[in-house]
Amino acid sequence: MSAGVEHICRSMVEYLKRHGVEAAAAWPGTPRQEGREPVVAVSLRGCRAHPSGFQDYLGERYDKDSGLWQERYGRRAELTFGLDIYGPEKGDGGAVQRTFDALAGALLCGGPEGMQVEEFSCGETAYDQSSRRLKRPAQAVCAAYLTAQPQSGGLFVDFELRGVAEV
């Protein structure tokens, strides 16, 4: 059984790319190409799960495929994303600022499916000695539900990421 958090960073990367922001996973597992444009390095800095109901019970949901009502269980999750912007070391930081503006626009208009952006913050652009690039730290806190439904016999299938509005 999984906890439903495996694809969260990938969801954020794909969402940002669809909104015109160059983004990549912070720890991709393969070498990254160094580009001339800034890129947002997406990481999951924190995940806090809170109870959302008695015994984590969220109620029932009608499943159109099976034609049956299914009980749903889950927890409210607070996801903290690192959205650090890295840009070429040469330049005045204007490209980093433009990338930040696009990032802010994408996050303030919504968020990835199933996630609601609750907070968004950033620091100042500065030279990062370890990466030899300009860096502007940023992060977003998103709310979501990690939900599951029991199979017959009481066992749970994998947890899924669901939006805060769907209960």
Image: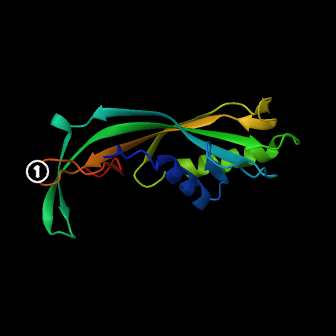
For residue 49, which quarter of the picture?
top left
Q: Amino acid at mark 1?
A: Gly
Q: Who's the residue at 18% across and 47% down the image?
A: 155
Residue 45, percent from left and from top: 52, 33
Residue 115, percent from left and from top: 42, 48
Q: Who's the residue at 43% across and 46% down the image?
A: 116
Q: Is residue 123 above or below residue 84?
A: above
- Reading the image, the residue beneath label 1 is 153
Inspect this view and state whether residue 124 appears.
yes
Inspect this view and state whether residue 109 appears.
no
Q: Nearer the viewer, residue 14 or 103?
A: 14
> Which residue extends farthest right?
90
> Which residue extends farthest left?
153
Q: Is residue 87 above or below residue 106?
A: above
Q: Who's the residue at 78% across and 50% down the image?
A: 34
Could you tell me which secondary element the residue under label 1 belongs to?
loop
Residue 130, percent from left and from top: 77, 30
Residue 66, percent from left and from top: 17, 69
